[in-house]
Amino acid sequence: MQLQPVLLLLSLPGCVSIQGPESVRGLEGGSVTVQCHYTPGWETYKKWWCRGAYWKSCGILVQTEGSEQEVKRDHVSIRDNQRQHLLTVTMKEVRQSDTDTYWCGISKPGPDLGAPIKVTIDPEEENSPEREKPGHCIQRRSFPVQGQGSSPGGLAGHWEPHMSPCLSP
């Protein structure tokens, strides 16, 4: 399935359709959970999780059916909590080869909505204090706006990251 060009920010300032952490880390063999928040109004739309640094080549791994029913495919599950406007994706039994850019998104007529998340899977090592603790992520304070291109590389705007605990169920 080919994705439509990205539209990450509505025309009103501060009105974000979907947002997630800038990055998350996990250990090989473990699980990684990512939570993306979306604005009210998108509750019954299908939500998806795809892999790929470039929007046009991002391949959908799992997708909801527009309900709160959890959907599992291979080692990935997705659940939409429509009351809390929260999309939760869990990747189990992760490997270092799962390190990549992923997107959480909303399928809609016209361009889909999406937010990129960098997922890094570290080798399972004992006593590695210099590495960021799994379960922590870098949260975004500001959001990208659509630039000239239709892929993430065409985005304008800036990010102001800060460390905080990831949200987890």
Image (cartoon, rainbow, N blue to C red):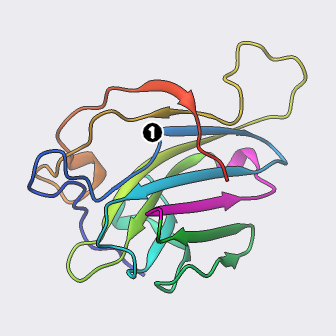
Can residue 84 be seen from the camera position used here?
yes
Q: How many numbered circles does the render carry?
A: 1
Q: Which image quarter holds the N terminus?
A: bottom left
Residue extending furthest toward the front: 83
Looking at the rendering, the stretch of residues picked out in magenta corresponds to 84-98
User: Hey, what amino acid is under mark 1?
Assistant: Glu
- Residue 66 picture location, percent across and down: 46, 84
Can residue 54 be seen from the camera position used here?
no
Q: Nearer the viewer, residue 169 or 136?
A: 169
Residue extending furthest toward the right: 126
For mark 1, what is the residue? 22
Write the residue at 39% across / 27% down. Answer: 161
Q: Nearer the viewer, residue 27 or 99?
A: 27
- Residue 85 picture location, percent across and down: 43, 63
Which image quarter: residue 25?
Answer: top right
Would residue 151 be counted in the magenta stretch? Answer: no
Q: Is residue 9 above or below residue 47?
A: above
- Residue 117 picture location, percent across and down: 47, 47
Please tell me whether mark 1 sits on a helix, a strand or a loop: loop
Would residue 87 be counted in the magenta stretch? Answer: yes
Which image quarter: residue 9?
Answer: bottom left
Residue 168 lies left or right of residue 37; in this view the side is: right
Write the residue at 87% across / 27% down. Answer: 125
Residue 122 lies left or right of residue 138; in this view the side is: right
